[in-house]
Image: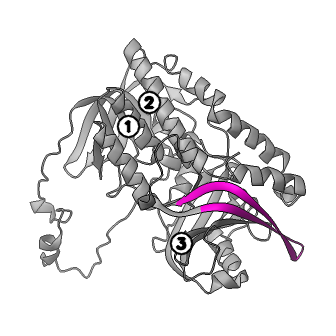
Amino acid sequence: MIVDHQRCCYCGGCVSVCPLGALHLAETRLLVEESCTDCGLCLAACPVGALSFAESRPQAAATRLSPRYDVIVVGAGPAGSLAAWTAARLGLSVLLLEKRQEIGSPVRCAEGIAHSGLAPFIEPDRHWIAATVDKAAITVIADGGHETLRAEGGYGYILERRVFDRVLAERAAAAGAQVAVKAAATGLLRENGAVRGVVVRGANGTAEIEARLVIAADGVEAQVGRWAGLETALPLRDTMTCAQYLLAGVDVDPTCCSYFIGEEVAPGGYAWVFPKGEGRANVGLGVQADLLAQPETALACLHRFIESQPRLARGSPVTLISGAVPVALPPRRLVADGLMLVGDAARQVDPLTGGGIANAMAAGRLAAEVAAEALARGDVSAEGLAGYAVRWAEGPGEKMARHARWRERFPPGMRTSRNFLRIFAVAVAGG
């Protein structure tokens, strides 16, 4: 296996489907060419002491992390931050870990959410809302022609996830959770088979931090759950491989989300145009991974789609993101002794639309509530945490299961039918 690091966007999709755990994600990396003369100028320029000669490695300052917490949450996306926020409000000592240096970046999301999915968790704020939408247009492209169905009345938002995710983490911190960035979980602490903490690699080296309970919110990669023995690897047929540009200089309706369905556009998936105001739009698509014939890629499909739409082809890409989205039901087990899965790590994503923000927040809150109850009883075994899966299945999971049945009922070749389009229209509206 050879990795082209110029093309790789470090999205973690390959990690999520590898059955052997043989792939690992490095968000970014610095390469040093052989032409380096070891002059040392770069050492003085580096603000975080990341560069050194082997014989004079600098010692980083100690962090403020405690040796133990009630709850450690791995991953500061919407699921992880809601879990940390809720747990802290319930009086638990909480550590929220984020392996990247900036919470909310890089964005791997189309950023759309219905008002009904957002409002139960946080009051909408213009500082992290790029556009308010109340219309949808679904265009079917098949047999060389196209037809557009339009609907009004849905109410939702296109977020600025870079800001939104950070705000959620700030709310967790304000509630009492400790937040640590550039702090990657690299393993689990175990006691008699049960999870009892995490191994953390940070700026000052590696540390073992104990916890009564760990909540894994580490995204589609889902490495923490895998370390605990849970089945988190995704089959290709249940994986949407996605690419998206933020295009500037495009002429789109600022209040309308547009969807494009057709095998010639996005096999097994769809393309989208989500407005972000001021002549900008998120333009992307998702393709069912097992339907792509190599060397075809989601990015190549996206280029063809944009070129086929004159109003989009005139735009300029200012951001490129890629990623993998699970479109399957959650794993058979969402918990292990001392550990819970939430968000994309638990495949809590709508199987029809690929939307996951609202589900992630719902899962994070629910997991923290069940965790607090289990900790109060002194039982964080898998049996003691089993109520989480039950409550999920009876709540947001019920709609997920219904949408999964519809996805099976309408395989890729049948998704241009009128019956499927009616179902899809309800799903994208949040129903």
Q: Are marks 1 and 2 in contact (CB under 8 Å)?
A: yes
Task: Please tell me whether mark 2 sits on a helix, a strand or a loop.
Answer: helix
Q: Quadrant of residue 41?
A: bottom left
Task: Please tell me whether mark 1 sits on a helix, a strand or a loop.
Answer: helix
Residue drawn at (21%, 39%) of the image: 65
Magenta segment: 133-158
- Split into 4 quadrants, where in the image is the C terminus? top right
On the rendered structure, is 183 left or right of 409? left
On the rendered structure, is 369 left or right of 266? left
Residue 144 in percent (x, y) is at: 88, 77
Residue drawn at (47%, 62%) of the image: 10
Q: Amino acid at mark 1?
A: Ala
Cα separation, mark 3 vs mark 1, equals 32 Å
For the question of whether residue 20 can be seen, the reply is no
The image's mark for residue 368 is 2
* Residue located beneath label 1 in the image: 84
For the question of whether residue 143 can be seen, the reply is yes
